[in-house]
Image (tube, rainbow, N blue to C red):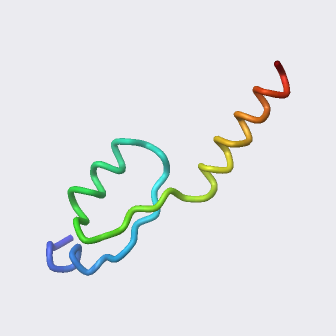
């Protein structure tokens, strides 16, 4: 994707993988990065389940 088009991107939704965040930061410098809701909910659900088990 040409730099001119990448600079037009305003927001990117990502999972929580650090490598994807680094790629997005480098390739889409003007875009705001947001973690998608699914991965946040999954992480919270897993933490809650761990507390229930204990």
| Picture residue at 21% right of the left edge, 70% below the top | 1
Front residue of 51 and 8: 51
**Callout count:** 0
Front residue of 42 and 5: 42
On the image, the x and y values in percent for residue 40 come to: 61, 50
On the image, the x and y values in percent for residue 18 come to: 38, 42
Query: 40 left or right of 17?
Result: right
| Picture residue at 35% right of the left edge, 50% below the top | 21
Residue 10: name its quadrant. bottom left
Front residue of 17 and 1: 17
Eyeballing the image, is 51 above or below 31? above
| Picture residue at 30% right of the left edge, 57% below the top | 24
Tell which residue pokes out farthest to the left in this image: 3
Tell which residue pokes out farthest to the top in this image: 54
Q: Pick the quarter of the image with the C terminus.
A: top right
| Picture residue at 39% right of the left edge, 72% below the top | 11
On the image, the x and y values in percent for residue 37 come to: 61, 58
Query: 41 left or right of 32?
Result: right
On the image, the x and y values in percent for residue 44 come to: 69, 42
Eyeballing the image, is 48 above or below 10? above
Eyeballing the image, is 50 above or below 34? above
């Amino acid at each position: 994707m040409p730099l001119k088009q990448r600079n037009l991107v305003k927001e990117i939704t990502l999972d929580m993988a650090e490598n994807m965040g680094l790629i997005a930061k480098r390739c889409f410098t003007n875009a705001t990065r947001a973690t998608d809701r699914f991965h946040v909910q999954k992480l919270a659900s897993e933490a809650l389940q761990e507390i229930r088990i204990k």
